[in-house]
Image: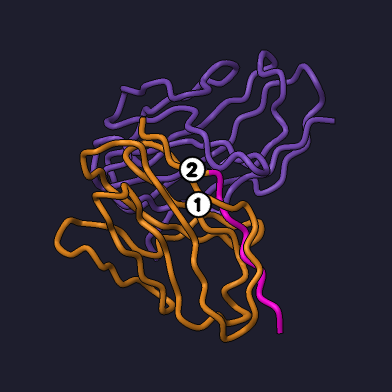
Chain colours: A purple, B orange
Amino acid sequence: DGGITQSPKYLFRKEGQNVTLSCEQNLNHDAMYWYRQDPGQGLRLIYYSQIVNDFQKGDIAEGYSVSREKKESFPLTVTSAQKNPTAFYLCASSSRTGLNTGELFFGEGSRLTVL
Amino acid sequence: AQSVTQLGSHVSVSEGALVLLRCNYSSSVPPYLFWYVQYPNQGLQLLLKYTSAATLVKGINGFEAEFKKSETSFHLTKPSAHMSDAAEYFCAAGGGFGAGTTVTVRA
């Protein structure tokens, strides 16, 4: 089955620790995205990538980092510099590379809680 | 990025009643428009999308949306609510998402 796989689904972290969220897709999509979801705020774009080895900052990139070494993988690292990292993180992909010009396919999400 | 406004963070309807979720976007140029649905602790899935082929767009699960350029709106409707429609709904346009509307369905 084609789709997007995020892991882990739940993650707990102590303050001051970096954590990496995995996102893998087998849809052969060029574009991949990371969003953060907080109650009542909708989805906010963290980073996006339209092609391998290239990525752009979204609206709330501070405290986060990404890499895109392979077409199918777009991991997100939440660093200790992120002041309020507790949130639900969603990875998405699209066959169209213009920002939000095509249908987004989402993973099941990763819920990060900082203790 | 587009500014997307969803009017009403919560909507409560009776089973069998009309569901109406409102979405307005900020640009006068028709952007790419989408409605997504999210069930608890899951990702979003596409309900429908505006492709400029028709102003009335039909989606999955009996939902439809009408694009009105003069009102910069893309409201989502379903004639008869079902218990399984209880979820959060997001409107998206040209790079941005609305804040979401949570739908509850009363028996």
Query: Please, what secondary structure does the residue beneath circle 1 have?
Result: loop
Vertical arrangement, residue A27 with respect to residue A72, above or below = below
Q: Which residues are magenta?
A: B99-107
Q: Position of residue B42 (x, y in %)?
A: 59, 57
Residue at 40% in and 65% down: B47
Name the spot of residue A110 as percent of width and height, x first. Answer: 63, 45
Host chain of mark 2: A
The amino acid beneath tag 1 is Gly
In the rendered image, the residue lying farthest to the front is B70
Q: Closest to the observer: B93 or A46?
A: B93
Identify the residue at image location x=62%, y=84%. Answer: B15
B12 or B58, nearer to the observer: B12
Structural crowding at the residue carrying mark 2, measured as other residues with C-alpha within 10 Å and reported as few (<14), some (14–19) or many (≥20): many
For the C terminus of chain A, give its image quadrant: top right
The image position of residue A2, as x and y in percent, is 37, 61
Dot 2 falls on a residue whose secondary structure is strand
Pointer 1 residue: A107
Cβ–Cβ under 8 Å for marks 2 and 1: yes
**B101 drawn magenta:** yes
Residue placed under numbered mark 2 in the picture: A91
How packed is label 1: few (under 14 Cα within 10 Å), some, or many (20 or more)? many
- For the point 56% across and 54% down, the residue is A108
Q: Is residue B33 left or right of residue A17?
A: left
Q: Quadrant of residue A18?
A: top right
- Give the mark, 2 or 1, whose residue is nearer the N terminus: 2
Tell me where residue A21 appears, x and y as whole percent. Answer: 59, 36
Q: Quadrant of residue A32?
A: top left
What is the C-alpha distance between the residues marked 2 and 1?
Answer: 6 Å
Of all chains, the one bearing label 1 is A
Q: Vertical placement of A63 versus A108: above or below? A: above
Residue at the location (24% across, 50% down)?
B69
Left or right of B89? Residue A85 is right
